[in-house]
Image (cartoon, rainbow, N blue to C red):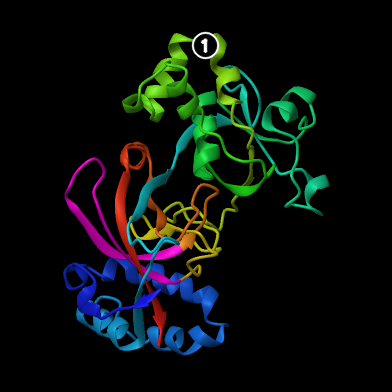
């Protein structure tokens, strides 16, 4: 990391930092017990949350920006996007609801980081029978939900179930999108949820085999009723994510909870996207220093933006002085 002057952050003074303030305060609920963060988080509670200038001055007075560099010394990395999908489902298996989302098995709780069998083996062996959490109506959307790690399920009897990451089989991730491209089934522009769903409609007999080319399997838990419908999913930091202000990062390189200034571009464009974010989540594919996943929110529009986002970007982490 290289200490930098605030003037070196492109667009810092142009950002609406009010939009990131609630995300930062959420981080403080987890960080305030740590000595380095206690004072700054305590003082943050006294800042007017609707005063952009006061928030900007607070960050400039209490934080030091550090430019993040890759292991080879370069400052540019890859910024991708993710979102919270919305699926249709039922608590019981019937009609169109034939694809289960699974709970993390109780028998695995004692060793949650142990590498388990691959997804296909787990499904074929019946080892997960009885662990069904909810049944959904689309296997492709269920597979994308495993990649995103959390989502919402609109239930056939009314209401919405919020599901969050509960664990995995700790196998490496392999992209079924990439497998479809390599086999000539789709081109790169079709490697999105709509594109894969279109392929699945053309080849329903091959869907199961293609989706289980990924050995990694993600398990879910249902969030309680105390989790507001307006809140984002719970990230790795243990706080709700904020749309367009939360980042997934490699926690071995960027401390969870820290503010991070991002300079990149909008998906599939050269329009600058420069704003304050907060490191609140992780992902199995997010590895390296200048590497992040931008949380776009929930629903179809967020999903389209997330699917299109693979931009070059730079990062600065803000640490208390």
Where does label 1 land, which residue? 204
In the rendered structure, which segment of residues is drawn in magenta? 258-279
Front residue of 27 and 320:
320
Query: Quick one: quadrant of the N terminus?
Result: bottom left
Quick check: can you spot residue 159?
no
Asked if residue 134 lies left or right of residue 126, the reply is left
For image coordinates 57% across by 82% down, the residue present is 33
**Numbered disc 1: secondary structure:** helix
| Image location of residue 155, percent across then percent down | 53, 34
Asked if residue 88 is among those painted magenta in the image, a careful observer would answer no
| Image location of residue 299, percent across then percent down | 38, 40
Asked if residue 279 lies left or right of residue 277, the reply is right
Asked if residue 57 lies left or right of residue 214, the reply is left
Query: Quick one: quadrant of the C terminus?
Result: bottom left
For image coordinates 51% across by 63% down, the residue present is 239
Whether residue 117 is situated above or below residue 20 in the rendered picture: above
Whether residue 207 is situated above or below residue 249 in the rendered picture: above
| Image location of residue 281, percent across then percent down | 49, 58
Asked if residue 181 lies left or right of residue 145, the reply is left
**Mark 1 burial class by Cα count in 10 Å: few <14, some 14-19, many 20+:** few
Asked if residue 277 is among those painted magenta in the image, a careful observer would answer yes
For image coordinates 61% across by 21% down, the residue present is 98
Whether residue 195 is situated above or below residue 151 in the rendered picture: above
Quick check: can you spot residue 270?
yes
For image coordinates 68% across by 31% down, the residue present is 119
Q: Main secondary structure of the magenta part?
A: strand
């Amino acid at each position: 990391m290289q200490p930098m002057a605030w003037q070196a952050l492109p667009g810092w003074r142009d950002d609406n930092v009010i939009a990131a303030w609630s995300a930062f305060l959420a981080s403080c609920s987890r960080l305030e017990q740590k000595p380095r963060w206690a004072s700054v988080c305590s003082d943050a509670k006294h800042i007017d949350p609707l005063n952009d200038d006061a928030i900007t001055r607070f960050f400039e007075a209490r934080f030091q920006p550090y430019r993040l560099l890759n292991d080879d010394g370069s400052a540019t990395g890859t910024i991708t996007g993710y979102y919270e999908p919305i699926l249709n489902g039922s608590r019981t298996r019937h009609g169109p609801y034939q694809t289960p989302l699974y709970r993390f098995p109780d028998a695995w709780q004692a060793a949650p980081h142990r590498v388990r069998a691959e997804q296909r083996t787990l499904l074929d062996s019946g080892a997960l029978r009885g662990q069904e959490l909810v049944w959904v109506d689309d296997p492709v959307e269920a597979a994308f939900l495993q990649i995103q790690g959390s989502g919402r399920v609109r239930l056939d009897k009314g209401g919405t179930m919020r599901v969050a990451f509960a664990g995995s089989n700790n196998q490496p991730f392999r992209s079924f999108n990439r497998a479809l491209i390599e086999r000539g089934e789709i081109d790169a522009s079709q490697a999105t949820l709509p594109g894969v769903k279109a392929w699945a409609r053309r080849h329903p007999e091959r869907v199961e085999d293609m989706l289980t080319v990924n050995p990694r399997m993600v398990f879910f838990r249902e969030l309680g009723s105390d989790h507001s419908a307006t809140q984002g999913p719970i990230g790795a930091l243990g706080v709700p994510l904020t749309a367009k202000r939360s980042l997934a990062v490699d926690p071995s390189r960027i401390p969870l909870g820290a503010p991070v200034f991002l300079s990149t571009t909008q998906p599939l464009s050269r329009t600058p996207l420069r704003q304050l974010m907060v490191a609140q989540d992780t992902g199995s594919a997010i590895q390296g220093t200048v590497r992040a996943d931008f949380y776009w929110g929930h629903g179809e529009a967020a999903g389209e933006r997330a699917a299109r986002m693979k931009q070059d970007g730079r990062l600065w982490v803000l640490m208390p002085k």
